[in-house]
Image (cartoon, coloured by chain):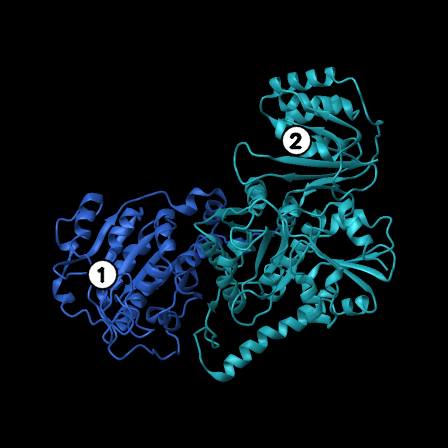
Amino acid sequence: MNKRYNILFGGELLGEALVKQGYYVFYSRDYQSLIRGGHNFNVLTFSENPVNSNESNIDILVALDENTKTIHEKNLKKGGVILDSKHPNMYFAGKLFKLLCLDFKILEQELKELKKRFDENIKEAKKGYEEETKNVCKVILQKNQIYFTNGGKGISEGAIKSGLDVYYAYPMTPATSVLVELADKQEKNNFLVLELENEIAVMNSAIGSSITGAKSMVGTSGGGFDLMTEALSSAGIVEAPVVMYLAQRPGPASGVPTYTGQGDLSMARHCGHGEFPRIVLAPGDPIECQELTSQAFYFSQKYKIPSIVMSDKHLAESFYSLDSKIQITKSQKTTSLARYNTYEKDSTGAGTDNPEIIKKNIENRLKKVQEIKKEAKKFTQYKLHGKKNKNLIVSWGSPKGAIIDSIKDLNCEFLQILYIEPFSEKIKDILENKNIILIENNATGQLANLIAEKTGIFIDDKNKILKYDGRPFLNDELKKEIERRLR
Amino acid sequence: MNLNTPIKPTWCPGCPNFMILAGVKKALETCGKKQNEMAIVSGIGCHAKIFDYINLPGLNSLHGRVAPVCLGLKVGNPNLTVLGFSGDGDAYAEGMEHTIHAARYNSNWNYIVHNNQVFSLTVGQPTPTTEKGFADKTMPMGVKTQPLNPIKLMLASGASFVARVFADIQQVEWVLKEAIKHKGFSFIEIIQPCLIFHPSIGYKEKTYSLEKTKHDKSSFDQAWKKAQEFDYNEVKKIPLGIFYQVEKPVFEDQLPQLAKLKKAGKSWKDIKR
């Protein structure tokens, strides 16, 4: 049973309650780039079985304004419920709790934890709870150990567990959630969060801190990342172990600020002038966000290189309920203050134009590419989901959830690529002689380009499922797209 | 303390940068800090070569990015004495925003801007402090814009220590020691004629020392007035010395995480987790 509904506020609150009750929940937010008003909506799916994405149809629609009803009514399933009347948010929360057979005590507890307007909220919630007469599902109480969290929290947790010392950022959606999360945790965990004048300062300061030995990280979205790329190149030659969090949104330029996309894969791989080693990692859920962030710190520290961890608005801000164990990779602090240079340098740290030294420096840096490639084999560079099949979906990052949910009953396998750089050599063998179906949240199939570059395998354009309207994949729509391409 | 490196300077013969280097070394040798307590940063330009000639750790950074790197070093280890060397192209063109914010943050490091009013390493183009009428191959009709007054800029941006000296060993040594003693951000501009592209003929004769006048360096109004005597365009009078010095809350001291490191004499590297 998958139930879904729409609620402006308290989606997270409801999700938490459902998780406490033992359900798996997926919850995503759709909001415009404005502060008050507009059309904002949240979609929440819950189930007794793991759920990682939303679908297009709705069981329960809570419409806090007429516009919401107009827009979404057409997606209401037969026998679906609409809750719409002029009432405060918590009234609807109460109604939903009754409708979904949730324990009112959980709501009361959640409202207490909000630490504001408790008396009003509880009064409104009680009213809604009492006035609702129907209920649409049975009570379950599973003892699942479920994390209810989003990608932004995953990145933050991963950084903290990796021993983060300093996080620098300039606010930019959808990377800001990590800035806020880390800012909140800094005093308790004794690290520092600084917001500087722009992304150029952010990355250069991170380099400054990292060469004193501090574990340093920066976070931004595409436009901010553009500004950081000169300093990324600097980190490359300086061999500064900076971890960069790149939360994508649709570009080019200002693009669509509060929506999702995966248009920056090529940028992450190639940006920054000159030739230097880097790693690029692409988690697909909040647990992988934690794990890969810790691996980014590990590779950055061990090989003194910049590393990039990618997410997007959908992964960073959607809430997932996951139950697998988290494996954090610990890392040492390897860098000490010495004479660093953005020029090619000699043994004294001074700039040089000596051809032998230049050649040797470059070779020393690029030697690490091979070493990293070798060591990366110890880590999960890709995952295969589902049973071995001639139909093979390939993707990276946030589409993972919708893909896993949509292929449950389909005759296909899913290859999820976690390590963009270094790219596993085994992937070529996996792709060989398969009906490869590419799924990406961009318009040009950047992963397909990467695969072609690394393996010589070209994915047929007809087999590319690309979504570039700023919205994430919905599992029912995606399923139809995949089905058409199965052999 | 041996601050020498084996690198032979590649500044032009007679370049005033040699005076600056000598003054800086003297100040560092006698400022009471140990060699491992100090770090240097430079940008890109003739000034930046100084990094190669002083044996201290740090970073010869990118063009315009001296200030954020210095802040990063202070954040990484608040116990370091940090000197950031910059040029007028670096500090006032490419990295202008960082210069302003550095003054605003008041982190305890020293910003030393070698101002020769010209891009020298790229062979002679005008910078934001080049006087009107200056002509070169890129501006054959001459500079039409008003130069920026960095002293006024720093005062307006909230710098707690604002000074200007000439590229002279004694002046540089003196002002740098004062700056290192100062708690907070110290801005020092050094007027450094470029013998090839901007010889600043007649400048030295017009200079006078604020220290020899009744100038009250704690007075913003007096500092502002003195700053206006030289607009980097017409050379009538060039006041030198400390224009302004006040105590303001220091960046590192206000952040409990950094204040703790400072008190314990530690850096983040020492924090085991």
| Chain under disc 2 | A
Where residue A91 appears, x then y in whole percent?
67, 20
Chain identifier for the blue-coloured part of the image: B
A101 vs B86, nearest the viewer: A101
- Picture coordinates of residue A366, whole percent (x, y): 60, 74
Q: Quadrant of the N terminus of chain B?
A: bottom left
Q: Nearer the viewer, residue A68 or A275?
A: A68
| Residue B31 in sight | no
Residue under numbered circle 2: A70
> Which tint is chain A?
cyan
Tell me the element at label 1.
strand
Which SS class for mark 2?
Answer: helix
Residue A145 placement: quadrant: top right
Q: Amino acid at mark 1?
A: Val
Instruction: Name the residue nearer the viewer: A243 or A402.
Output: A402
Residue A117 location in percent, x, y?
58, 21
Instruction: Give the residue at mark 1.
Output: B165
Q: Amino acid at mark 2?
A: Thr
Q: Looking at the image, how many numbered discs can be counted on the residues?
A: 2
Q: Quadrant of residue B163?
A: bottom left
Q: Residue at x 75, y 41 (%)?
A: A55
Q: Position of residue B63 (x, y in %)?
A: 40, 65
Residue A394 in view: yes
Is residue A317 positioned above or below B175 on the image?
above
- Judge depth for marks 2 and 1 and give the one in front: 2
- Left or right: residue B259 compared with residue A177: left
